[in-house]
Amino acid sequence: MNNLFIIGNGFDLAHELKTSYLDFMQNLIERCIKKESNIIKGISIPTVSVGRKFSLSQINTIVQSQPSCTTSLLIRRLLQNMALNNWCDIEHKYFDLLSSVKNTSNTDYRDIKTLNSDFEQLKKELISYLSTQQCKNALESYKNIFGKLANKNSLILNFNYTDTIRLYEKEISEAQIINIHGKLGDINNPIIFGYAANDEENNILIDKNDNEYLRNIKNLLTIELVMNPD
C-alpha cells in the first residue's frame, strides 16, 4: 500500500503546541517587556502593569508610541498587522517589504541587507521559541492512523520545524520521512524560513540581479539544499 502523509502546523496545534506565528509574536513581545529578550530595546511599561496579559492592540500601542523604543521596521509592520487583523504571517510581510525596497525615502526599507538582517534576527528568535514547544504525549487517534496506514512504501512530508512526529516512531518506523523545511537543532538540515514565492515572483526577484533578494525565498532554498546537500 502506497500512502502519502502531509504533516503541517495543524498537526502541532492538535498536540496543543503554540506554534503559530501569532503565538510566537505574542510571546516575543511579552519577553521583551519582561527584559528577557533585547530584540526590542527601550520598551517600558508602568510598574503596576508588569505581569498582566496584553492584547495585540495594546502591545502595538506600547511599541509604536514610545520614541525611545528601538526595533526593526519589520516587527513594527507585523505588530500593526496583528493589531488590525488578529493574524500574523511573517513570511508574507517580509515579501511585501522585500518587494517594496527602493532607494527612495517613500519606502520602509531602502537597504535590502538591513531587511535581511532584521529577518535573520527574527528567525533566531523563532528558532529559540519553537525549541520550547515540545509535546511528550502521543494521541491515540494518530497512533491508530499511522499504525494502520504507515508502512515501508509510505512517505511522510513534514513541513513543520518541530519533531512532534517523533512521538510515533514505533508506528512510522518503516516509512520514509522528509523534513522538507528543515528541522530544529539539525545542523545537516537546518530550518528553511522564508517566503514561498511563485514562478512569477521568483522571476521578478531574479531579474533584479542581486542575490540578496533571493536569500530568504523558501522554494529556492529548498532546491539549493537538494542540489547541494553538503
Image (cartoon, rainbow, N blue to C red):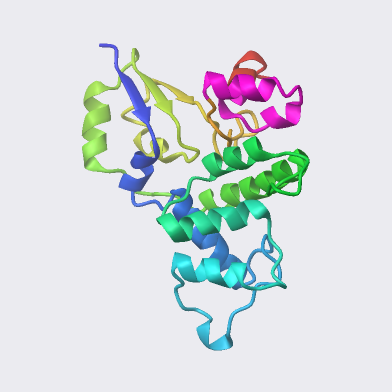
Identify the residue shown where x is 54% and y is 27%: 197
Identify the residue shown where x is 35% and y is 14%: 152
Magenta segment's dominant SS is: helix
Instruction: Locate the C terminus and report the quarter of the image it occupies.
Output: top right
Q: Quadrant of residue 37?
A: bottom right
Is residue 181 in the magenta section? no
The stretch in magenta equals: 198-221
Left or right for 49, reference 230 = left
Left or right for 170, reference 103 = left
Of 133 and 107, which appears nearest the observer? 107
| Residue 40 in view, yes or no | yes
Q: In x, y percent, where is residue 225?
A: 63, 21
| Residue 225 in view, yes or no | no
Left or right for 23, reference 2 = right
Is residue 215 in the magenta section? yes
Q: In x, y percent, where is residue 215?
A: 69, 31
Q: In x, y percent, where is residue 71?
A: 68, 60
Q: How many marks?
A: 0
In the displayed structure, would residue 152 be above or below residue 222? Answer: above
Of 133 and 222, which appears nearest the observer? 222
Left or right for 53, reference 80 = left
Instruction: Locate the N terminus and report the quarter of the image it occupies.
Output: top left
Identify the residue shown where x is 70% and y is 20%: 207
In the displayed structure, would residue 109 be above or below residue 197? Answer: below
Q: Quadrant of residue 47?
A: bottom right
Q: In x, y percent, where is residue 131?
A: 54, 49
